[in-house]
Amino acid sequence: QVQLVESGGGLVQAGGSLRLSCAASGRTYTTSAIVAWFRQALGKEREFVAAMRWNSGNTYYADSVKGRFTISRDNAKNTVFLQMNSLKPEDTAIYYCAASNNIYNIVPRRQAGYDYWGQGTQVTVSS
């Protein structure tokens, strides 16, 4: 089992920045691991935001955040970050960290592709 704990959410004005963290403990990541961020706005379905292959560091982004958000990692601390810049009110959501140790040729962008989830952290962007 992998336990994920997110932190770093909060309230920020439009145009501002936040950095989310996702710390893993327990079994942690294998070489095939993928770690991702999803978000869920009120009344909407959970959507893919960004992902990283743990071994290679290759990154993947939703079109809506490309150029504004950056996913990165600290291998030694088994921690993944999501740097969010130029935030918009439509970025307001609960942000979830997710992980999978399964082997995928294509990085999954659906919830079903991930076995481990954090509890979520609220990000609110005011206009």
Image (cartoon, grey):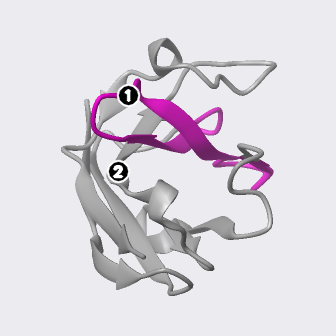
Q: Is residue 31 above or below residue 115?
A: below
| Residue at 53%, 43% in the rendered image | 35
Separation of marks 2 and 1 at Cα, in angstroms: 9 Å
Alpha-carbon neighbours of circle 1 within 10 Å: few (<14), some, or many (≥20)?
A: few
- Return the x and y of residue 111 as percentages of the image width and height: 46, 20
- Residue 13 left/right relative to 9: right
Give the answer, above or below, for where 77 lies relative to 90. below
Residue 93: which disc?
2
Callout 2 touching callout 1 (CB < 8 Å): yes
Q: Residue furthest front?
A: 127
Q: Residue at x 35, y 41 (%)?
A: 41
Is the C terminus in the top left, top right, bottom left or bottom right quadrant?
A: bottom left
Three-letter residue code for mark 2: Ala
Quarter of the image where one finds residue 110:
top right
Which residue is at 47% across, 12% downward?
112
Q: Nearer the viewer, residue 52 or 69?
A: 69
From this view, report whether residue 18 is shown above or below residue 21.
Answer: below
- Mark 2 surroundings: few (<14), some (14-19) or many (≥20) residues within 10 A: many
Residue furthest out toward the top: 112
Q: Position of residue 6 (x, y in %)?
A: 27, 59
Let me know if residue 34 appears in the view: no
As shown in the figure, which amino acid type bears the numbered disc 1?
Answer: Lys
- Judge by depth and name the residue closer to the eye, 44 or 29: 44
Tell me residue 94's x, y (percent).
30, 49
Inspect this view and state whether residue 47 appears. yes
Taking 111 as reference, is 12 left or right?
A: left
Report the residue at 38% width, 28% height from top. 44
Q: Which residues are magenta?
A: 31-60
Task: Please give the residue where the numbered disc 1 appears in the rendered image.
Answer: 44
Q: Is residue 81 left or right of residue 71?
A: left
Q: The N terminus lies in which quarter of the figure?
A: top left
